[in-house]
Image (spheres, rainbow, N blue to C red):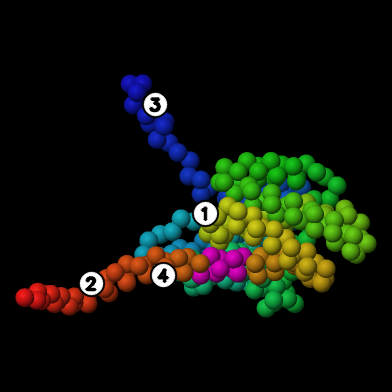
């Protein structure tokens, strides 16, 4: 009886797709309990519900099956936390745009924008009078940030994406020191934003999204640095929502470059075969039998 029982335990495996929802829920609970940073529970619930509903409909319509809802939950709860508006409709619309982009804006089977990033940027641009972004900081209490970072580090490391987060954080801090030197602002003031809940979502979810990041590990680190560099430039230009805009620009550009290189590699790989196949279709000319002089 022991052997079958042991085998059954070995077959019980935790689906890693649930790790991101667990982490984003921890961020929500810690932030809300500590600072009450949600606009309202009802608005957040609306964002989550809309994301899941749109995912179910489009997944069934385009894929012919019911999709896994972990990604939709993360997108919805991210919208519920990051969007600030006195109205309800921006939460539903932002979630709908986020999920719809996964199915409609695709290149070679890949969606090239992080869904939540695209939806939030769209709302910030198209409904600037009604929508703002989350700007709450953890304040002088380090415990909430430590809790989130502890869980986030373990979970993202388990998913094999921690190098992206660490590259971005290190780049942000170095560029914060550079901004401080250029502007004369205190270093702590330039570095402080990364301690806020918005950045916890940004560094643990948006820039590490497996579906919208390039494949090579070294390229992922380069893209993370470029996102931080573009963000630093936008901050110097006084753009309030610099991280969203930076990822909106750099992320898809990197994905499109990778797709273009993959297409080129595929063409080069098939070229010799095509040449050989073409050559086999050309009939060989009979060789003339040499005449022997007598």
**Front in this rendered view, residue 171 or 64:** 171
Q: Looking at the picture, tell me which residue is in the foreground, 138 or 186.
A: 186
Where is 262 relative to 32, above or below?
A: below
28 sits to left or right of 240: left
Residue occupying image coordinates x 75% and y 77% = 129
Q: Which residue is mark 4?
A: 267
Q: CA distance from mark 1 to mark 4?
A: 36 Å
Query: In which image quadrant can residue 246 be found?
Result: bottom right
The reply, left or right, for residue 51 in relation to residue 204 is: left
The residue beneath circle 1 is 70
Q: Nearer the viewer, mark 3 or mark 4?
A: 4
- The alpha-carbon separation of the residues under discs 1 and 2 comes to 52 Å
Q: Are marks 3 and 1 in contact (CB under 8 Å)?
A: no
Q: Are marks 2 and 4 in contact (CB under 8 Å)?
A: no
- Badge 1 element: helix
Residue 146 appears at what percent x and percent y? 74, 42
Task: Kindly state the secondary structure of the residue where label 2 is placed.
Answer: helix
* Number of marks present in the image shown: 4
Would you say 58 lies left or right of 241 here?
Answer: left
Q: Are marks 3 and 2 in contact (CB under 8 Å)?
A: no
Q: Is residue 100 left or right of residue 141?
A: left
Q: Nearer the viewer, mark 3 or mark 2?
A: 2
| Residue, disc 3 | 6
Work out whether residue 58 can be spotted: no
Label 2 and label 4: CA atoms lie apart by 20 Å
Q: Quadrant of residue 270?
A: bottom left
- The reply to whether discs 1 and 2 touch (Cβ–Cβ < 8 Å) is no
Give the crowd class for mark 1: few <14, some 14-19, many >=20 residues within 10 Å. some
Q: Nearer the viewer, residue 7 or 263?
A: 263
């Amino acid at each position: 009886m022991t052997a079958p029982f042991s085998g059954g335990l070995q077959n019980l495996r935790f689906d890693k797709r649930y790790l991101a929802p667990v982490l984003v829920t921890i961020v929500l609970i810690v932030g809300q309990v500590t600072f009450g940073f949600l606009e309202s529970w009802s608005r957040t619930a609306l964002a989550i519900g809309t994301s899941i509903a749109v995912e179910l409909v489009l997944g069934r319509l385009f894929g012919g099956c019911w999709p896994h809802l972990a990604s939709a939950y993360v997108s919805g709860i991210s919208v519920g936390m990051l969007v600030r508006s006195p109205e309800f409709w921006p939460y539903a619309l932002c979630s709908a745009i986020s999920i719809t982009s996964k199915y409609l804006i695709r290149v070679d089977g890949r969606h090239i924008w992080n869904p939540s990033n695209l939806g939030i940027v769209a709302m910030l641009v198209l409904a600037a009078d009604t929508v703002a972004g989350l700007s709450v900081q953890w304040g002088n209490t380090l415990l909430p940030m430590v809790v989130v970072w502890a869980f986030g580090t373990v979970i993202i490391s388990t998913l094999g994406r921690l190098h992206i987060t660490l590259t971005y954080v290190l780049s942000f801090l170095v560029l914060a020191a550079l901004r401080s030197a250029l502007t004369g602002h205190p270093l702590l003031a330039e570095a402080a934003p990364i301690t806020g809940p918005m950045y916890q979502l940004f560094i643990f979810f948006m820039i590490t999204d497996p579906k919208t990041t390039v494949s090579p590990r070294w390229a992922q680190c380069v893209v993370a640095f470029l996102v931080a560099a573009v963000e630093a430039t936008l901050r110097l230009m006084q753009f309030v929502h610099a991280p969203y805009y930076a990822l909106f620009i750099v992320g898809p550009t990197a994905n499109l470059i990778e797709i273009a290189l993959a297409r080129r590699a595929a063409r080069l790989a098939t070229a010799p075969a095509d040449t050989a196949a073409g050559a086999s279709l050309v009939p060989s000319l009979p060789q003339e039998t040499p005449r022997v002089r007598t």
